Image (cartoon, helix red, strand yellow):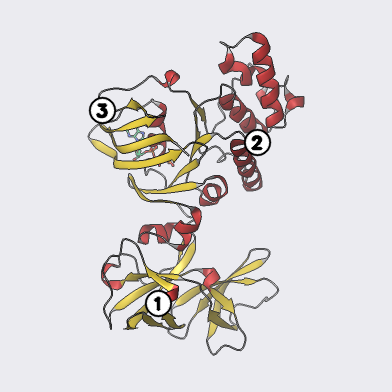
């Protein structure tokens, strides 16, 4: 694979305010990247810098090995071979679906343009809607047309700015999978910007979790969830709690749910210090790390339950008063106020030294919030 996009230590300012600084990542040809983060962290501005709508105050952006932006120079957007899809579809209301898709192909010979429009209509499954106008389409159909219009001129890079956020949840999930399939089939390199991690997980190969203008971790969805590089990522991605533990011996940590041995825990990557024997740590426990076990000596009180179809997410109070979450098959349907036998069943967990703790101990978190 070769590098298509190189973002090297870029900085951007709105007036005196730094939107982001020292931000770097690479995207390989055919790869789908995602910038994921809470509102206002700078995702859209990064995308606008890549598209050429905003200038850099430091660093460099290269496409196919050629610099397109630095602090002195910015190649005009129309010369970058970049396609864009926006949240609000931005279709031309007075043009038909076919005319919208063919809009960026005005320099191609007529026959070639017609064929490309037909191919794109087939790709998005809307061949029968060629002569309809945008207002005659559903939101999902309009967004498919917007995607086809952006892809028709065969851009080197596609930028997708919150493309599914105007759609309802079911359609959002379906369309995000469809879009991934289309991009992968056509080997399109793309960057998605979103604050919805479900969307990021279902579309992207690599995800950069952003916070206050910094990328906190650029990694696969699996690693973000199972090997968060710091507490922000641990809090932002997925659900879970931090439980207190104590280092008993080298490679052995004691906590309320049992003793963890070295082969199932690792230090958070940014948490460099080695925890000495006797020191206190925080252990990240995900809902899937705690399983139902009626015969267990650990009995926890159900304080809340959320039905999720195949599973129920139980909120459980331990004897110490600490709270944990547990995702249990929904045929184990128990009432709030009952006690549930549970056991820790984790392949690995992440530990954080307590000295560096910045979040409340045992604070329950959900990354779906903004
Ligand atoms: N034109 C502008 N002038 C001044 N400040 C701006 C401008 N556009 C954005 N900002 C500020 O820059 C910061 C980053 O904005 P940006 O839109 O990139 O964030 P975002 O992560 O995409 O947010 P959202 O998810 O809400 O779209 C925010 O603090 C925002 O208020």
Characterize the local packing of mark 1: few (<14), some (14-19) or many (20 or more) Cα atoms within 10 angstroms.
few
Mark 1 vs mark 3: which is more N-terminal? 3
Mark 2 vs mark 1: which is more N-terminal? 2
On residue 140, the disc is 2
Characterize the local packing of mark 3: few (<14), some (14-19) or many (20 or more) Cα atoms within 10 angstroms.
some
Q: Residue at the spot x=56%, y=24% of the render?
A: 154
Kind of element beneath mark 2: helix
Percent position of residue 54, x then y: 35, 27
Mark 3 → mark 2, Cα distance in angstroms: 39 Å
Mark 3 vs mark 2: which is more N-terminal? 3
**Near-viewer residue (230 or 66):** 66
Q: Is residue 23 left or right of residue 79?
A: left
Characterize the local packing of mark 2: few (<14), some (14-19) or many (20 or more) Cα atoms within 10 angstroms.
some
Residue 60 vs 97, above or below: the answer is below
| Label 2 with label 1: CB-CB less than 8 Å | no
Q: Number of labelled discs? A: 3
Q: Is residue 142 left or right of residue 230?
A: right
Q: Residue at the spot x=29%, y=22% of the render?
A: 73
- Nearer the camera: disc 2 or disc 1: 1
On residue 262, the disc is 1
Q: Residue at the spot x=66%, y=47% of the render?
A: 170
Q: Is residue 113 left or right of residue 315?
A: right
Percent position of residue 338, x then y: 60, 83
**Near-viewer residue (183 or 198):** 183
Q: Is residue 96 among the parts visible in the rendering?
A: no
Kind of element beneath mark 1: helix
Q: Quadrant of ligand 1?
A: top left
């Amino acid at each position: 694979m070769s590098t298509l996009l190189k973002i090297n230590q870029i900085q951007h300012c709105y007036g005196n305010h730094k939107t982001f600084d020292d931000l770097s990542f690479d995207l390989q040809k055919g790869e789908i990247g995602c910038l994921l983060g809470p509102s206002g962290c700078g995702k859209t501005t990064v995308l606008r810098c890549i598209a050429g709508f905003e200038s850099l105050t430091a660093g460099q952006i290269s496409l196919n090995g050629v610099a397109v932006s630095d602090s002195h120079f910015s190649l005009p957007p129309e010369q970058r071979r970049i396609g864009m899809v926006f949240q609000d579809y931005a279709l031309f209301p007075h043009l038909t679906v076919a005319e919208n898709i063919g809009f960026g192909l005005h320099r191609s010979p007529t026959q070639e343009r017609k064929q490309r429009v037909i191919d794109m209509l087939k790709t998005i499954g809307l061949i029968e809607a060629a002569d309809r106008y945008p207002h005659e389409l559903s939101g999902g159909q309009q967004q498919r047309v917007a995607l086809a219009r952006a892809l028709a001129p065969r851009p080197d890079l596609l930028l997708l700015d919150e493309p599914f956020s105007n759609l309802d949840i079911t359609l959002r999930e379906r369309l995000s999978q469809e879009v991934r399939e289309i991009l992968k089939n056509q080997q399109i390199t793309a960057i998605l910007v979103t604050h919805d991690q479900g969307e990021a997980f279902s579309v992207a190969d690599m995800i950069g979790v952003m916070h206050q203008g910094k990328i906190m971790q650029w990694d696969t969805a699996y690693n973000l969830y199972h090997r968060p590089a710091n507490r922000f990522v641990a809090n932002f991605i997925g659900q879970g709690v931090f439980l207190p533990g104590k280092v008993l011996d080298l490679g052995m940590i004691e906590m309320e749910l049992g003793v963890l041995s070295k082969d199932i825990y690792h230090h958070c990557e940014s948490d460099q210090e080695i925890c000495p024997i006797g020191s206190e740590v925080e252990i990240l426990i995900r809902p899937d790390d705690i399983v139902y076990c009626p015969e267990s000596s650990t009995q926890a009180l159900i304080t809340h339950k959320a039905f999720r179809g195949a599973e129920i997410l139980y909120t459980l109070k331990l004897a110490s008063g600490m709270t944990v979450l547990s995702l249990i098959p929904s045929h184990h349907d128990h009432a709030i106020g009952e006690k549930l036998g549970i056991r820790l069943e984790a392949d690995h967990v992440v530990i954080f030294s307590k000295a560096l703790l910045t979040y409340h101990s045992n604070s329950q978190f959900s990354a779906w919030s903004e």
